[in-house]
Image (cartoon, helix red, strand yellow):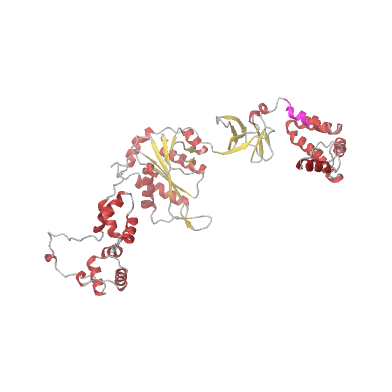
Amino acid sequence: MNTLSVTEKETIVGLLRLGWSIRRVSRETGRRHETIRRYGFEAGILSPRAAPKPHTRAEVPTDLKPTTRSSCEPHRAFLGAELAKGRNAKAIYQDLVEHHGYAGSYDAVKRLARKLHPAEPKISCRFETGPGQEAQVDYGEGAPTRDPRSGKYRKPRLFVMTLSNSRHAFRKTVWRSSSQTWCALHEEAFAYFGGAPKTIRLDNLKEGVIEPDVYDPQLNPLYAQMLAHYGVVALPCRPYAPDLKGKVESAVGYTQATALKGRRFESLDEQNAFLLHWNERWAATRIHGTTKRQVRAMFEEERPSLLPLPPTRFEYFRFCERRAHFDGYIEVDGAYYSVPPRYVGTKIAVHVGRLWLRILDPATHQCVREHVSAIAKGQRRTIDADRPKQTPPQLEKLVVRIGGAGSACGTFARTLVDQRGALAARSLFGMLDLLRRYDADAVERACVLAAAANAWRLRFLRLYLAQHQTPATLQAQHPIIPEIETYMSHFTAHTQGVTP
């Protein structure tokens, strides 16, 4: 006879008082049906016929099976018809209670629904690949490790690359991920294997895929260039289909459950050293459950099929977009780089490396210019082919327009163009703005003083005019503009239908 604690007994009695079935109470508490019946009978909840009848094992008939009738049996036809419509058991149970007077339990409805409409098992297709054909990559969670910044334990990211043929894997933890970190982990994995697979199957994380798409996924430019350096092709999984890379999913789970479960590390280097030792000592020497062969032995057969590594590592860069200004330069990190004149006014792609900067054609993505990176802000990198062959015609038009305000203004504008070339365009537009805000005579006097002081800067004109002149005001009268009353009389006559 099972003797339960007071708490367990009260739990069983309380659930029976709520109207739970013996089967449901047994599933919830883990106790046998006979025990639940006995305590329910003692509490006066169950009828005497439900009380257990003591017997010995020899008295129990072995050729008879218990015949219990489901409380949902009278509604079998209704249940089958609703299941055929694609409805679930919960919705059918609610209709039975509200419209058919059903007083049984929801569990009885579920059991009968399983009999009438058994679920079809999901069949998974196993993908097998040849030696050196494919590797799969993914992130997981590593073991708790002390963060050097906060001093607290937290879980880093666990990177795993698994060769699909031999199941040999590379494992490493990092605190945070980025496009460059993601690429660098791939390079470390290739170096660990001594070669690169022909294809990489990955999930749609941002470090690898910018825009997931079933038919046309867009790879991260840095990741795509890194793989191209090694001759590897990326195969992103379809969105919401992680089972296509089940080998690395299994490797991540195997690492977490076997190597890292219940462990703590004081540093990331300590955890990575442990993973490397564990991988060589245990993971690589195990007999794989699917292939039934040792992982290391299969890897030694796969190694010759891997792509040879290039003589140099990939040179990392960052990707950005810049608009080419009308002066023929783009600005990156405060420095200026010349572009071919045909790209002026358009947005172009730029690859910024540690020692170089490449400008790409927006249509073909081919490199059209390569500069040495500037050392300091404000520096300019110019290629002679990007210099204008002559002063652009629009500058000549601006000089003529400014010269109409006075000879000194024209001389000042011409000197700016001679000294600065195409870069004088902004200063010329600034002079036009001064002529709009101040009287032409005042700007003419300022240009005379600038020429006398040999100060060929727009800043000199602006400071002089701001201190010695006031901006021109709107004129109330003008010889070619009639009085406002004239317009009012014309408007009144037009609205009243009177011809002036």
Q: Seen in the image, is 95 located left or right of residue 230?
A: left
Question: 50 above or below 481?
Answer: below
Near-viewer residue (454 or 328) = 328
Instruction: Provide the residue span drawn in magenta.
Output: 390-398
The x and y percentages for residue 350 are 59, 36
Near-viewer residue (364 or 191) = 364
The x and y percentages for residue 220 are 50, 39
**Residue 397 is one of the magenta-drawn residues:** yes
Q: Seen in the image, is 442 located left or right of residue 31?
A: right
Residue that sits furthest to the top in the current view: 389
The x and y percentages for residue 372 are 62, 34
Q: Number of labelled discs?
A: 0
Name the image quarter holding the C terminus. top right
**Residue 341 is one of the magenta-drawn residues:** no
Near-viewer residue (417 or 200) = 417
Residue name at image x 33 percent, y 44 percent: 285
Residue 250 in sight here: yes
Residue name at image x 34 percent, y 56 percent: 90
Quarter of the figure with residue 215: top left
Q: Seen in the image, is 289 located left or right of residue 377?
A: left
Name the image quarter holding the N terminus. bottom left
The x and y percentages for residue 102 are 29, 62
Quarter of the figure with residue 9: bottom left
Near-viewer residue (131 or 72) = 72
Question: Most prominent secondary structure in the magenta stretch?
Answer: helix
